[in-house]
Image (cartoon, rainbow, N blue to C red):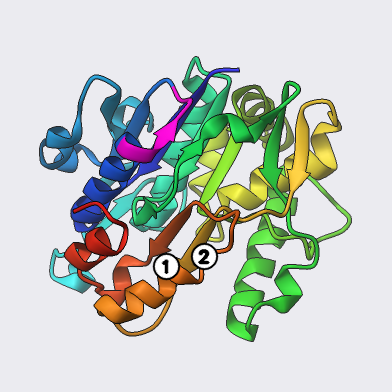
Amino acid sequence: MQSAIATASYRGDLERCRLLCESIDRRVTGHTRHLILVEAADVPLFRGLAGPRREIIDERELLPVWLRPFPDPLSRGRRRIWLSPKGPPLRGWHVQQLRRIALAAAMPEEVMISIDSDVVFFRDFDVSWFVEDGRVRFYRAPGAIPRLDPMRREEHRRWSKKTGQILGITAPATTDVGYIATLIAWRGDTVRAMVRHIEQTAGRRWMSVLAGTRSLSECTIYGRFVDEVENRPDWHVPSDVSLCQMYWFGAAMGADALKDFAATLAPHQVAAGIQSFTATDPALIRRAAGLG
């Protein structure tokens, strides 16, 4: 099965995305190409990352004409919001999810490997790990949601409840299974079946349905579709193996803290993600990852 890597990014993550690209080029094998999905205004900034096996994809190739970005007046134009007649204003991280679903439904490769732009590969990795006898490993962590801190737990349950509504699942309303990770694989044929199911359930186009809510988790939609709707055990192998260790919150890490963080990667973890909001210096991350 052919696999392509996809990364949704934006100008604020440019240097982190550059690190990701360097680490992929040095350490990742088994994929046909790497696609970086960005807003139209960011295409010129990311064009320098393009190469023989890397393409910069303008979101206008994936999103409908009625969903467009504008400067966010609440941030004095520093951030963007996406406006549409279908629902409330969307943030960049909402729209990144729509881009990934649209790409997975359209790309010719059978498998899409989704990687966040603040991830760096610390170890060699062949993406064929995600395919086993024609079945694709998809991230599924039973009982993960109750183990989250209370604020995140409620957020994940809101996403799960909205997913049930989108997919027409009447019971259970929510699930305690976790489906969200920063390095995951999706089958293209499953995504196409998923969006058809959303359209049949809602009676309108899938993009219109998902753009109508801010309680959106594309990983949860995919996971609950596989678990509760698709009924194709010959297509997927559930796995709770998280290949990427994340630093989500906290102060910016210095060189010593990054070294300690890298040392805590489990043997199966091939990558680490340092959330951009922590303001950790990308130059320090580059050195910690052994990229120069």
Q: Is residue 40 left or right of residue 142?
A: left
Q: Quadrant of residue 118?
A: bottom left
Viewer-proximal residue, 264 or 106?
264
- Type of residue at label 2? Leu
Identified at 42% across, 67% down, the residue is 262
Residue 253 in view in this figure: no
Q: Quadrant of residue 85?
A: top left
Check residue 107 in the rendering and tell me which mark sits there, or answer none: none
Q: Which residues are magenta?
A: 26-31
| Residue 175: x %, y % from top left | 79, 61
Question: Quick one: quadrant of the N terminus?
Answer: top right
Q: Secondary structure at mark 1?
A: helix
Residue 287 belongs to the span the image colors magenta: no
Tell me the CA gap for discs 1 and 2.
6 Å
Identified at 51% across, 33% down, the residue is 126
Count of numbered tags: 2
Residue 193 in view in this figure: yes
The residue to which callout 2 is attached is 265
Identified at 60% across, 49% down, the residue is 219
Q: Is residue 73 above or below residue 15?
A: below
| Residue 164: x %, y % from top left | 75, 52
Viewer-proximal residue, 114 or 27?
27
Q: Residue furthest top?
A: 108
Marks 1 and 2 close (CB-CB < 8 Å): yes
Residue 29 belongs to the span the image colors magenta: yes
- Type of residue at label 1? Ala
Check residue 262 in the rendering and tell me which mark sits there, or answer none: 1
Q: Secondary structure at mark 2?
A: loop
Q: Label 2: few (<14), some or many (≥20) within 10 Å?
A: some
Identified at 66% across, 77% down, the residue is 148
| Residue 48: x %, y % from top left | 12, 35
